[in-house]
Image: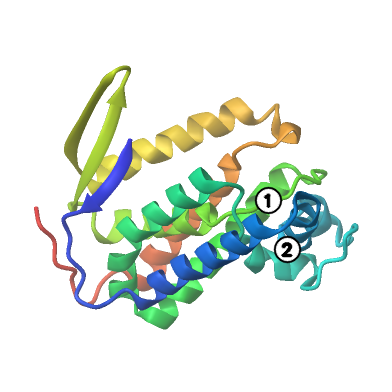
Amino acid sequence: MIPIKDLNPSRSTPVVTILIIVACTLIFTYEALLPPSYREIFIRMFAVIPYEVMSGTDVPPPDPLTPYGNLVSYQYLHGGLLHIFGNMLFLWVFGDNVEDRLGKVKYFLFYTFCGIVAALIQSVVSPNSTIPLIGASGAISGVLGAYAVLFPRAQIVTLIFIFFFVDVIVLPALLWIGIWFLIQFISALISINHLSMGGVAWFAHIGGFLTGVLLTRLFFVGGREGKLLT
């Protein structure tokens, strides 16, 4: 289930969303140009290491931003083309409307905070892990949470795959995001006994999403209404 676009035009240029996409793309390009051994060091220097966060101990290589500064920097690192492409696609589809509603400064703070909480949740679940946590998906999960609250009736144009069957359908945002969250929840339950093996940080997705829903309901619901195409 891949989002292609939403039928919910924003009223302003999503400057912050575009800048985040550009920053992630430039940093990923820099990562890709590094020799493999240096790339691993670079990632470990700026990724979240759950053990470091939970113990307050900086294990080699040293973190220029300290383990807690990496709660921000990890959001701009990615592990491969599919990783960054999927994250940036989701951010592009859902981020512009949330940015439009929250305002640019609040949106950036909201995005960053959701990413921080996402990493903390993943660290709490696997406190002894030394596997680097990287990617924007925790923060973007928060954006999805905000979108579900603010624009539940917006229409999401979706590419679906069912075995060899491929089609494009339109789903209400609340249903689309509900299905997405159910997948994250089930995947998290399946992975709970295999956290030391790496893979997808499902609990970070859940933590970011729930943070986005909670913050949006507490601070951003009400006031001017977004334009919806229903």
Depicted 24 relative to depicted 1: above or below? below
Where residue 193 appears, as percent x and y from the top left, is 70, 27
- In the rendered image, the quadrant that contains the N terminus is top left
x 21%, y 54%: residue: 6
Crowding around mark 1 (Cα neighbors within 10 Å: few <14, some 14 to 19, many 20+) is many
Task: Looking at this view, name the residue that lies furthest to the left.
Answer: 230
Depicted 211 relative to depicted 180: above or below? below
At mark 1, the secondary structure is loop
x 17%, y 65%: residue: 9
x 39%, y 69%: residue: 17
Number of dots carrying numbers: 2
For badge 2, the amino acid type reads: Phe
- Relative horizontal placement of residue 204, taking residue 104 as reference (left or right): right
Read off the residue under disc 1: 133
Callout 2–callout 1 Cβ contact below 8 Å: no
**Which numbered dot is residue 17?**
none
For badge 1, the amino acid type reads: Leu
Nearer to the camera, 133 or 161: 161
Read off the residue under disc 2: 46
Where residue 132 appears, as percent x and y from the top left, is 73, 50
**Mark 2 or mark 1: whose residue is earlier in sequence:** 2
Where residue 162 appears, as percent x and y from the top left, is 30, 21
